[in-house]
Amino acid sequence: MKGTMRYLAGIAGQSGYGSKSTADQVTQDCSSLPPRLTAIVTGATSGIGAETARVLAKRGVKIVMPARDLRKAARVKENIQKEHPKADIIVLEIDLSSFASIKKFCSEFLSLEIPLNILINNAGKFSQKLEFSEDKFEMTFATNYLGHFLLTELLLEKMIDTARQTGVEGRIVNVSSVIHSWVKKDHFDFNRMLQPKHYNATRAYAQSKLANIMHANELATQMKAIDANITINSVHPGIVKTGIIRDHKGIITDSMFFVASKLLKSTSQGASTTCYVALSAKMEGVSGRYFADCNESRCSALASDDSEAHKLWKQTRALIYKRLRNEIKS
């Protein structure tokens, strides 16, 4: 109850920010921001991703925007540059549910020979019905987790090299969700998540978001072990106002709608935690943590289980590289 009241009131936490803080507000003090940073932001064609890209570009960060829909990406780029004419934005094609497309994107990005300081794994998929990616994995899990895992894997060496050459800390941000805490250990089975026999859309989404946190925690441990100047954290953006809520207003009572609306964030409030973790000087050296409302928060016991995180990482890496080796052979 105390936490809910803090959320509704927007009371600031240790960071100086809270649930009502916007992405613009949490990045206002960028006087100490290193020059010429480059960030890749997935899912930047709409919503929280587009706002994240806008605010980072406003703060002088070069934005690389991977997008499946290049027309939408071009519109977002145009809108940002109308507001900030000096914004440097590159659009490249990607389908995060496809290993082949991710490999192609990474190859194209690396061929640009530009630094990579920030990687924001923001894109999200919520598949209402059971469908499979071209690699024959359940679509939500393939997009939200497997795709971002492979993307990070293929770009990690570039980030390590950039940090080593520039002396600037590299930062990876995995956008997760509080819904990860709904997942119980007996439902978190890797093979069943890849090809479920009984599909539940909400559970599939929650499992993918749990996997995002475990990925961040395991990678943070690995980066520390090799003394790489890279941090990786996961964030819960909050529940953001969308057309879905408005569409269902006629089904629920006005009083319920009023209460629900008070719990929702604007898009800029939803992007604030991602932007804070990606840019704030207060985040220097902080890794393997989970943030909500721009403050460190608790994730579930399963999400915090180091042995389960390492097990998931090994299973995922073995699956991906087996698939990639088979592609090469064929």
Image: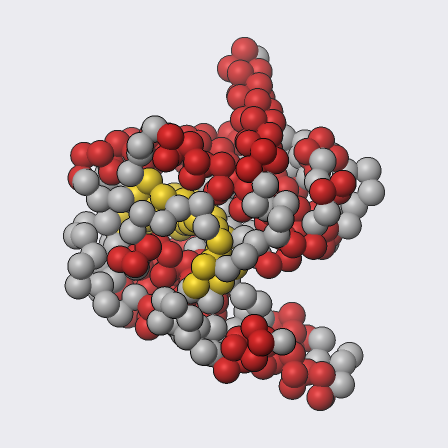
Judging depth in this view, the residue of 99 and 171 nearest the camera is 171
Location of residue 2 by image quarter: bottom right
Q: Is 234 above or below relative to 260?
A: above
Left or right of 197 on screen, residue 142: left
> Which quarter of the rendering shows the C terminus?
top right
Residue 212 in the image: above or below residue 76:
above
The residue at the point 33 percent across, 55 percent down is 283
Residue 317 on image: x %, y %: 54, 26
Q: Looking at the picture, how far across and down is residue 144, in whole percent? A: 57, 45
Q: Is 125 in front, or is 190?
A: 190
| Residue 316 in the image: above or below residue 61 | above
262 with respect to 220 (left or right): right
Q: Return the x and y of residue 112 as percentages of the image width and height.
A: 26, 35
Image point (47%, 73%), residue name: 19
Nearest to the observer: residue 170 or residue 132: 170
Left or right of 162 in this view: 271: right
Residue 94 seen in this snapshot: yes
Query: Which quarter of the figure has residue 164?
Result: top left
Quadrant in which the N terminus is drawn = bottom right
Q: How is the image coloured?
A: secondary structure
- Choose between 325 and 95: the one closer to the eye: 325
- Residue at horizontal 71%, vertical 88%? 255
Q: Residue at x 49, y 33 (%)?
A: 150
Compared across the picture, whether 25 is left or right of 29 comes to right
Total count of labels: 0
